[in-house]
Amino acid sequence: MNEHIQKGKEALERDDLQTAKDEFNLAMRDPNPIVQRIAKGRLNEIKSRELSESKTRKSPEIQNVVDSSKSGFLSDLGYRVGNNGIPKKERRDILREAFYSTILKEAHWGPAGSRKRFEKLRSELNFRISSNYRKFEMTNAVNDWREDLKWIESEFSKEVFPGNSPR
């Protein structure tokens, strides 16, 4: 992982937003497009966090909605759904990147393009759906996750399950 991404994450853990911004801006200079996407996603997350913190002073419920969708590698890549999400094409590009990327730790995600990677992506989306489907404010996000789950299954299942389809 890029050293500036790591230092930026550590600064975020300390709530040092300025240092985090500086580190993620330095990471934007990395030639690897995945590192750039992570840095851009983190910079956007900081902007959202700053806006959210100013709104949270008025309504504590807002913070919970924002935080529930900001975890994991997909978020690091800029994957966002729901009312403040990104367009479908960009989400699909990020999901494709996550499936084929070699930057992910194989111990957790499996090799790029593998059945394990496919199942991990499906599991991530299924978890987000099942954790949020009863929350009215998450309706659009849940619909996006469901669409993306169907897309993942149609896009990658032939590659990882030749002659068959996933469960």
Image (tube, rainbow, N blue to C red):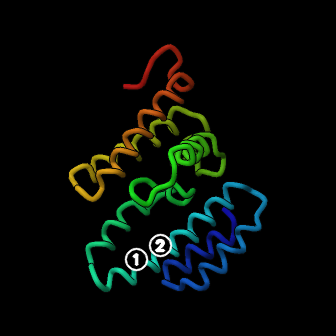
Placement of the C terminus among the 4 image quadrants:
top left
Number of labels in the image equals 2
The quadrant of the rendering that contains the N terminus is bottom right
Relative image position of residue 9 (x, y in whole percent): 56, 73
Q: Marks 2 and 1: CB-CB under 8 Å?
A: yes
User: Residue drawn at (59%, 44%), measured in percent from left and top?
Assistant: 93
* Location of residue 89 in the rendering, given as x and y in whole percent from the top left corner: 56, 43
Q: Is residue 27 left or right of residue 89?
A: right
Disc number placed over residue 106 in the picture, else none: none
Q: Is residue 10 left or right of residue 148?
A: right
User: For numbered disc 1, what is the local secondary structure?
Assistant: helix
Q: Classify 79 as above or below 55.
A: above
| Residue plotted at (29% across, 51% down) | 139
Checking the image for residue 48, the label placed there is 2
Residue occupying image coordinates x 23% and y 56%: 135
Q: Residues within 10 Å of mark 2 (few under 14, many from 20)?
A: some
Residue type highlighted by circle 1: Ser
Query: Looking at the image, is 102 positioned above or below residue 138?
Result: above
* Secondary structure beneath label 2: helix
The residue carrying mark 1 is 52
Q: Looking at this view, is 16 or 149 the one in front?
A: 149
Above or below 93: residue 136 = below
